Structures are given as C-alpha cells and as structure tokens.
Amino acid sequence: MPAHLMKKLNVRDEARCGMVVPEGALFRGGASATVKQESVEQFNLHTVVSLPQGTFAPYSDVKAVLLFFEWSGPMREMWYYELPLPEDLKKFSKGSPIQGEYFAEARELWAAYRQGRGTARCASTACPWVVSVDEIKERGYDLTARNPNREETETYRHQPRSPARCWRRSGRFWAVSRGCTR
C-alpha cells in the first residue's frame, strides 16, 4: 500500500505516487488495516479509481483499483470514481484492452474537483463521490469504493422457480426418501 512506497520515496512536499492494487486490498483487515491506517494518517491518499472487472484479462480477472496519493500530510477526504465499461464492450480483454481515452471523463471531473468546483452532479453511475476521513475511520479504514450513485441490483444464477414447482419437487423427494413412489 502507499505507506510502504512513500517511505521509500525522497521526502518532498511534491512527492506523489499512483499504483494499481487488487480491490480486496481496500477492505482487508489485519496487517492490511494497519497499513491503510498509516496511509490515511501520514499521507494524502486522495483518489481511488475503481476499474471494471477483467481490466487486466487475460493475465488477471481480479477487480482492481488505481490509488493516488501525495506526501502532503494526512488525508482529509477521498475522491472516488468508478470507471464505466464502454457500452460496446462486455469486458476488457487482450483484443480490446483499456485505453487512455476511457479516462477522459475521470480526468475532467478530477480537475473540476481540484479547482474547488466540488463533485459533479449527474445522472450517470460514473459520477464521482467524496468520502470524509472521519467516515473512513468509522469504517475501520475500509477504503472500499461503494458507489452511492449506482443502485444495488440482485443477480440470480438460475431462473427463480415457482413455489408450486418447488413443492412438487420436494414432494417427490420425500416420497422417494421414504421408499415410496407416487
């Protein structure tokens, strides 16, 4: 995480770094929580960009995030952005890798935020959001990018079965398990 890398950099006010980490690093506890606490309290860990699932496929299908931080003192708030998958793609792949152009909106929104114009108001789920350092501390230094602009949807692996069909199947199960037939 950032604390380890920043300690290796020359201590300068303008020292900054960006890194790619698996999304799991944002919410793990134990030693990871200690490292995240150091990162928040000693460095300005200011930006998390959540990348779509499979961004680094075929090499890794693990969901990843970009972290950006500076040596400018403790964090005050964190700016989050969830990079949307382009509409014409199901996922990134070796044949259709992530491109710099996909970050154009994120760069524009980040510049507006840094210029003090706040977070953008928009209907898109890609809209950025800001979380205070106090909220991150309350969450036990869980830095997970939970997008408040996106509705949580439930997904099912299988088609839900009708209650009548389930009852009929369970009746057959009990009949067979008792050694009877229907």
Image (cartoon, grey):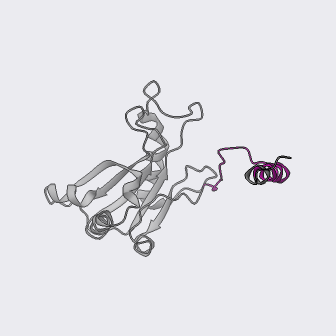
Q: Residue at x 54, y 56 (%)?
A: 120
Is 134 in front, or is 160? 160
Is 108 in front, or is 158? 158
Query: Percent from the top left, x then y, of residue 137?
Result: 40, 73
In which quadrant is the N terminus drawn?
bottom left
Is 138 in front, or is 171? 171
Q: Residue at x 20, y 61 (%)?
A: 13
Decide if residue 118 is on the left or right side of residue 148. left
Query: Percent from the top left, x then y, of residue 160?
Result: 75, 48
Q: Is residue 118 visible?
A: no
Residue 77's image quarter? Answer: bottom left
Is 133 in front, or is 1? 1
Q: Residue at x 45, y 41 (%)?
A: 103
Residue 24's image quarter? Answer: bottom left
Q: Is residue 63 visible?
A: yes
Residue 11's image quarter? Answer: bottom left
Decide if residue 150 is on the left or right side of residue 110. right
Please give the range of residues in magenta. Answer: 150-173
- Residue 151 included in the magenta stretch of the image: yes
Say if 180 sits above or below 29 in the image.
above
Query: Percent from the top left, x then y, of residue 90?
Result: 57, 33
- Residue 115 included in the magenta stretch of the image: no
Q: Residue at x 43, y 39 (%)?
A: 61
- Furthest residue to the front? 179
